[in-house]
Image (tube, rainbow, N blue to C red):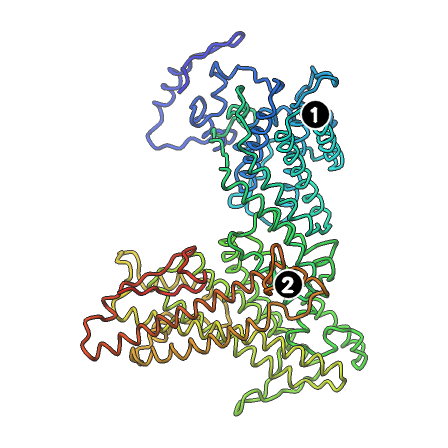
Amino acid sequence: MAHTRVLHPNVQVNEITREFRNAASKLSPGKLIKDEHFTLFEAVSALEIGDPKMDSGCTAFDPESDEEFDPTKALSAEEIIWLMDELMYREVAWQMGYPLSQTLFTSVHIERLLWPEPKRLSDASFWRHDPVPAATPSLLRDIFQPYCLGLIKCCDLVLSMVTSQHYYEEEDFATQIFNRPLLHVFSVGEVMDSLEAARTWLDHSQLSSHLRRALTSRLEARSAFLKLFHECDCGVRPSLSNLERHIALVRTIEESASLGRPTSAVAFTLKIQRRLASSVPPRPMIVIEKDKAFPFLRKLLTDATTAFQVLDISSSCDLLVAYQNFMAQDPQPVVYARALLQSFLNLNGAVVGRFAFKDFITHDIASLVLPGEALLDPSQMDDLPENQQIELGSRVDLFVNRCSQSFLNFFRTLCLNRCRVRRTMCHAALEWDQIQAEAEDLDGAVQSILSEPAIPYLDGEEPTFSYSFSSWVYHYKLIQLRTVLQMGFELSIYAPHEFAGMYWYLSFLSSTHLNHLERITFFVASRQRPSSSGQQEIQTTLQLLYRHFRWLKAVEAMAKALHRVFTVLQRHGHFHKSAVTYATDALRYELRMRPFLHVSIPEPISMDVAQQSSSLRGLSDEKLITQASNLVQTARKAWDEVLKGGWNFYPLPPGDSKADMAADGMSKSPGPVVEREWTQDVRNSMKACIGTGIVVTTLGTLLQKKTTGSAVNIENLKVEIPPVGDRSRWHVSWPVPKLQS
């Protein structure tokens, strides 16, 4: 703690300790005193005042804090290189989510440029009141100052992009700028001109060639980042040809980092924090290591450039696949790239710059369920009375407007961090459940107005209607429920003893979805569209439905096979439940099934029914292994079909999908990133399928040996679940047990 009495000139100090104690002694213990003008924030701040660990302003009483920092001291080229790299490491730390107060705002040079706030770009100078004569060469003024301006403007563009989209500050990004606008009012062109002038000055300098190359590469890289962020901000597609050149610049900087030499004067200090916000605790300085900073920069360049490949996509179903796979990269794209992909959902007032919001959703409805022609195209309503045209058109428009934002939010949700994706989809499932109820009302109105005939769907059942709109909603709700469940494996939410039950429920969801697609297929095939174009639309929709069908068939077979594998292992004493008194089966089931218990369709399953169905008590171990073996074969065939079908349903513009293919048919870097990630995901699923087959074969062999009295049995096996990131974990959503004798 600081001294109890601190005297300053012209300050009168009154000792109030005795009066305070006398007043406090009259209060009974536990009595709450509240003053409406003395808030909780002020109360906590009062407790922290004078504590060096909690009060950053307390450093004002440190005699060393009165030291006058001199950012204008002449520096060598090696020291300039070191400063540039140190600032870059702190810039990376900020983009990783650390606050500016712990990263860039610990620099005395950045502080001098930003405070007081410059009114003109020329005011952003290390020399505010005593400028160095222009005729005097100065690396600090002519090289380092423009570099700092470029860095600050890059941060401004990154901040603008991230804050314009959905993000979570406590998890993804720190946006507090402490009343120091990051040169926001100045144009990119002005800053680019200063960087270009610095490069020109450097070309005519007398520095040695290796130092000049090192400084030039840093200036060029700063210009490249600034140009890239500006193009992204304007929605202008960066050139893929520049990406390799920019990555080469980053590699050059990494190789020349050893040339840097730390400055003798203080360049970074935590004492600047007290100028930013003295009411918060001092926090440590964050510097990202070199080995992490440069890979981050290369990934930032790659993600921001290749993200524009989604603009080539011409359909909503392919766009969903693109968003899912782009965001599922390992490591996940940086926050800036995720915000950039969100911005494409409203690019120049249209989805990916080409679809009006209404057209985007109506095209998706039409391509999946193929409702009556009059429903989505007002020009086809001529046969209806005018009042029915108005009623039907208004109800369809109301529904489209109602769910359009939810549909776009589905894509936007995929751009969040992985934990947030799952959490948000849990809430979204309830919203889509409500939308499905509204869609059923719309379907009822459509049946009444258009006099839709009922068709017998299954033999022996009463005729029913197509329910086109609610079928479309149900399809996307099931996708989200399945994503929530599978991400539970990816995020290591489930304990190993819960895997059997969760795989059983995954197979249940997949089977439900398959039955739903079969129903949609039946009604689409029953459409009466005599024209050739109408027949072509029916065939296109049927092909799209089959595409969804074979993916779900692979998922269902894999889930059923792994369900049987884990069931057999649990029967033989593996994966015991935790023996804690506060954990019960009912509480655990409620916790795991919470995202699924509050939706109306599919109907919630009680714990007793779930346990009875997932335990497979009526089947012997041998029967389960036989079933698992057949299911693995089914899954392998299904994954093969999925892989052959490719990631996109609709063709891309000529030259986009194959432009970056190598001679062996594999994508080169940077290549079509979605194709690369989707193909790798399917192949990883196939590896998990093969691994499951090996486990099934091993268990089957041990069961056969058990009848002969062999000493080796399933109980004696060592069973492990490879964690996410382990080489033995072939797919994040398909954990396969690893068996060892």
Residue type at mark 2 is Leu
Q: Position of residue 577 (x, y in %)?
A: 29, 61
Please indicate whether residue 704 sits to the left or right of residue 450 in the image: left
Residue at the spot x=66%, y=87% of the render?
453
Residue type at mark 1 is Ser
Confirm or deny contact between disc 2 and disc 1 (CB under 8 A): no
How many marks overall? Answer: 2
Q: Position of residue 609 (x, y in %)?
A: 37, 74
Q: Position of residue 295 (x, y in %)?
A: 54, 45
In front here: 312 or 423? 312
* Crowd class of label 2 (few under 14; some 14 to 19; many from 20; radius 10 Å): some
Of helix, strand and loop, which one carries label 2?
helix
In front here: 265 or 318? 265
Q: Closer to the observer: label 2 or label 1? A: 1
CA–CA distance in space, label 2 to label 1: 51 Å
Q: Position of residue 592 (x, y in %)?
A: 40, 62
| Numbered tag placed on residue 628 in the rendering | none
Residue under label 2: 319
| Residue furthest bottom as drawn | 460
Please indicate whether residue 372 sits to the left or right of residue 67 in the image: right
In front here: 383 or 570? 570
| Residue furthest front as drawn | 209
Q: Quadrant of the N terminus?
A: top left
Of the residues under marks 2 and 1, which one precedes in the sequence?
1
Of helix, strand and loop, which one carries label 1?
loop
Residue under label 1: 205
Q: Quadrant of the C terminus?
A: bottom left
